[in-house]
Amino acid sequence: MPKIKLLIQGYATEINGVESASSATTLIQDGNANVIVDPGMNRKLLLDNLVKEGLKTEDINYVILTHTHLDHSLLVGIFNNAKVFDNSDVYSFDGKISSHNGKIPNTDIEIIKTPGHDQFHCSVLVNTEEFGKVIIAGDVLWWRDGEKQERDILKLVDREDPYVKDEKALKESRKKVLEVADYIIPGHGPMFKVKK
Ligand SMILES: [Zn+2]
């Protein structure tokens, strides 16, 4: 079964009037595959935390981007052996692009489409022994640092997103992830257990 490790908890804050943010960065290890979801934009923290796991950037086989906003995707190019997955396609650093079927090869990792925050947004579903079904939800749900994290499902579905592109689609995507997941890793803010 895949193992999951939150390498960096996503954050979004303001320091001396300057916006400072980076997405949650998650490492999934399944069989021989090392997978990063959303490398984010904090290079030093990412490299330091990979070293702690005994990994180099070359050891990463796949990178999944929940969406291409740069606070989630800026560092994608540092994994030069990785194939990069978005909601529908796979990209290689030799310039090849092909489509995928929602599965990461030879793993139990699944990509599900969750539009709304961004039209091409996706989330990642991982079935783990430790946490049950975990969904790495990108900005389907996210919080600024210090903001109260609602736990009530309806409040989570209705939560305001100042950057939403399609509100109706976002609500549907939230319902979908909240229904399936035992735990959710949001784009920014702590991982939480879904109240059933
Ligand atoms: Zn974000």
Image: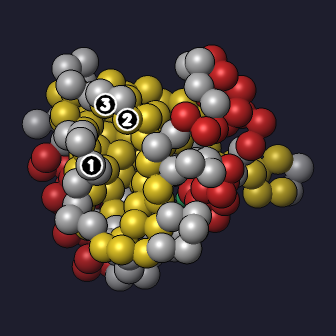
- Image marks 3 and 2: residues in contact by CB distance under 8 Å: yes
In the depicted structure, whether residue 100 falls above or below residue 194: below
In percent of the image, x 47 and y 59: which residue is there? 84
**Which residue, given by chain and number where applicable, does mark 3 sit on?**
30
Q: Distance between the residues labelled 3 and 1?
A: 10 Å
Q: Which amino acid does label 3 sit on?
A: Asp
Q: Measuring from the top left, give residue 174's x and y in whole percent.
A: 25, 60
Compared across the picture, whether 46 is left or right of 151 comes to right
Question: Few, some or many C-alpha atoms within 10 Å of disc 3 (few <14, some 14-19, many ≥20)?
Answer: some
Quarter of image, ligand 1? bottom right
In percent of the image, x 27 and y 49: which residue is there? 105
Q: Which of marks 3 and 1 is nearer the N terminus?
A: 3
Q: Measuring from the top left, give residue 91's x and y in whole percent.
A: 47, 67
Question: Few, some or many C-alpha atoms within 10 Å of disc 2 (few <14, some 14-19, many ≥20)?
Answer: some
Q: How far apart are marks 2 and 1 (CA)?
A: 9 Å
Q: What residue type is labelled 2?
A: Ala
Q: What residue type is labelled 1?
A: Pro
**Which residue, given by chain and number where applicable, does mark 2 sit on?**
33
In percent of the image, x 13 and y 46: which residue is there? 180
From the Cβ of disc 3, is ligand 1 less than 8 Å away? no
- Residue 8 in sight in this render: yes
Q: Which mark is residue 88?
A: none
Look at the numbered disc 1 and give the secondary structure of its residue. Answer: loop
In the depicted structure, whether residue 39 falls above or below residue 89: above
Q: How many marks?
A: 3
Look at the numbered disc 2 and give the secondary structure of its residue. Answer: strand
Q: Earlier in the sequence, mark 2 or mark 1?
A: 2
Residue 86: image quadrant is: bottom left
Compared across the picture, whether 95 is left or right of 153 comes to right
**Which residue, given by chain and number where applicable, does mark 1 sit on?**
105
- Image marks 2 and 1: residues in contact by CB distance under 8 Å: yes
